[in-house]
Amino acid sequence: MRLRIAVLALLFIGVLPASGAWADDAALTAEIKARVNELNQAFADRDTAKIETMITADQIAVIPVYGKPTTFAERLPTLDQYKAIRSAFAPTQVKALGGTAVLVTYENSKQGTYAGKPLSPRVFVSQIWVKQDGEWRQRLYQETPITGSQD
Amino acid sequence: MQLHQIIVAAGAAILIQALPASADDASVAAEIKAAMYKLNDAFAAQDVNTIESMVTADHIGVSSYYGRPFDTEEQIDTINDFKAEYFDFTDPVVTVLGPDAAQITFENSFRGTFEDKPLPPRVFVSEIWLKQDGKWLQQLYQETPINAK
């Protein structure tokens, strides 16, 4: 009897998703979207202490107006020079990449400047978030200028 | 089987699930790089069958000169409109994101045109690769123009 229970238990464990902690994709999507919004708000508030808790130590951002991939430490001194009004976010897509990483993609229109230079008016954004010590942290933020949508 | 044996067996099963599929990240990185080079060669040779066999069904690409995200069918339809000479690739950096997912990033300079419009002189590239049915397939290819060196 005990052997049968053990076999059933192992079979049950075997069919759990790799993410394990997630009951379903909807729960993961909701949590990641909340983290994305929280980090966006931290940037809007220039809350550097909070930003630093929400990104990995090796986080990089690739934003056309900066001209090169940058670390947060590199962007920090000029954070006040980034002035943007975001609008018309396209629906955010969240794709699980195994249990401890997700890909977030969306399109965004915005108006603004960085160091007096205009920002790309519409961009495709991808973000990689990874789970470290139980917290989702952004590891990569990448923008590509676009002029239209896929559909 | 005693209760403690059941717990040990269950713990071992969980541990096995948590381990990466390959022996170590270095071997996964080697596999991903080989797949990336093979896909690049397929594009250079305009080998549509190989391209289609090396990307996921939901693959998307994003580049500034395309102007919008595109799927594989759209990319193949315009494959003759992309004319480029590549040079100065940086060494690709592979980050293993899980047993069946990895990201590769690098920078690249190229000269060329897409639909007769000039390509950006230098780009940062990120790619997401997923292991499906035992084979690494590209799911996302994204370029961002950066300053020329």
Image: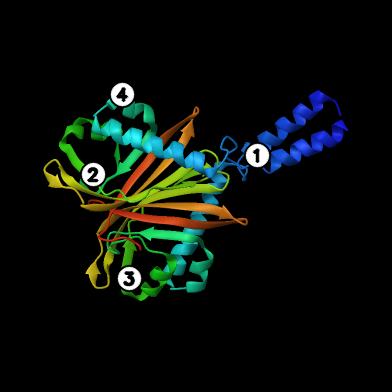
C-alpha separation, residue under disc 4 versus residue under disc 3: 45 Å
C-alpha separation, residue under disc 2 versus residue under disc 3: 32 Å
Callout in the foreground (1, 2): 2
* Nearest to the observer: residue A124 or residue A139: A124
Residue B91 visible, this angle: no
Q: Residue furthest left?
A: A116
Amino acid under label 4? Answer: Ala
* Nearest to the observer: residue B121 or residue A65: A65
Q: Residue beneath label 4, please?
A: A49
Quadrant, the C terminus of chain A:
bottom left
Q: Are marks 1 and 4 in contact (CB under 8 Å)?
A: no
Q: Indicate which disc residue B17 carries.
A: 1
B9 on left or right of A100: right
Q: Position of residue B1 (x, y in %)?
A: 86, 29
Q: In the image, is residue B89 above or below residue A133?
A: below
Q: In the image, is residue B134 above or below residue B12?
A: below
Q: Residue beneath label 3, please?
A: B82
C-alpha separation, residue under disc 1 versus residue under disc 4: 35 Å
Give the SS element for disc 1. Answer: helix
Amino acid under label 3? Answer: Phe
B83 on left or right of A30: left
C-alpha separation, residue under disc 1 versus residue under disc 2: 41 Å
Q: Residue beneath label 2, please?
A: A86
Callout in the foreground (4, 3): 4
Q: Are marks 4 and 2 in contact (CB under 8 Å)?
A: no
Q: In the image, is residue A47 above or below residue A9?
A: above
